[in-house]
Image: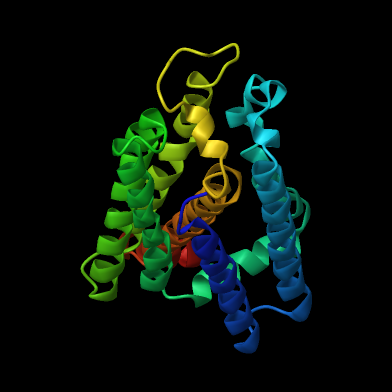
Amino acid sequence: MKFSMLPILLLIQLLVIYRATKSTKTSGEIDSRQRNLVNTILVGLGIWAVISSYFSLNDLYQTEAFLTSLPGFWITQIPILIVMVPWILSKSLRQGTDSIIDHTPLSLIMAFEGLRVFALGGIIKGYKGEFSPLFAKAIGIPDFFIGVLALTGAYLIYKGVWGNRAAITINLLGFIVIIPFGMGLINLGLQGPLYYIHETPSTATIFDFPMALAPTVVVPIFVMVNLFVAIRLIQQEKSREIRIMETSPAVSARKHLAEFRP
């Protein structure tokens, strides 16, 4: 087992989301139930991270049965289900996540997403022959540049140069890099129906500890943040456009004319 930032990065993710939720609750933007729902999901993600670590440390991820089961398509979905099932079922939770995003400065959200620059560690290991070259190049490099772009966006949004539309673009790119491309690429290097790329070391190294935390927890969390932020910002942009249209001279004139009609 080699040193990796992934366990630390996971801890930072959970703590940042916890603090953002607590701050939003303190400001009165969400209630105790909404805060507890978010915190319960964070606990669920933490428990899954422990389980995934156990599987990795005990080589359960290196068994033939696992590697041939197209894990890129399903093991990556477990943390997404932990988040998305309650999010879909609970209107209160959806409103709570919207409030957390609204209450947190967009520049700070983008800085959080900029933590993806730590994908550089996997890229270096890939070029040193300690990690799958396929994953390091095809996923690690784009993921790293998404992190750089997010940090650039954080600075320019803070300075008022960029706005919501730039953030929407960055978040959608961050989502697309992983879903569906990342999920499919994992399977191309594993023994199974899609086994196409033979390399040394193989893609199976992504399931060694602590690297296994990347596809099973850390990266899905970033992807879900991308999704939630993009959805919320698009909603804000549509609301802003509607307000502009309603206050435009042409619309105002039509309203006045309608008032004088018999």
Above or below, 20 against 259 in this view is: below
- The image quadrant of residue 192 is top right
Name the colouring of the figure. Answer: rainbow
Above or below, 197 against 205 in this view is: above
Asked whether 227 or 49 is in front, the reply is: 49
- The image shows residue 135 at horizontal and vertical percentages of 41, 33
Residue projecting furthest to the front = 1
Residue 19 seen from this side = yes
Judge left or right: residue 158 versus residue 214.
left
- The image shows residue 222 at horizontal and vertical percentages of 50, 53
Judge left or right: residue 87 versus residue 212.
right
Asked whether 41 or 58 is in front, the reply is: 58
Judge left or right: residue 105 versus residue 165.
right
Q: Give me the residue at 36% from left, 51% from top.
A: 121
- The image shows residue 238 at horizontal and vertical percentages of 45, 56
- The image shows residue 89 at horizontal and vertical percentages of 78, 52
How many numbered discs sit on the rendered protein?
0
Q: Give me the residue at 38% from left, 64% from top.
A: 110
Q: Give me the residue at 57% from left, 67% from top.
A: 11
Asked whether 91 or 221 is in front, the reply is: 221
Residue 257 seen from this side = no
Q: Give me the residue at 46% from left, 26% from top.
A: 202
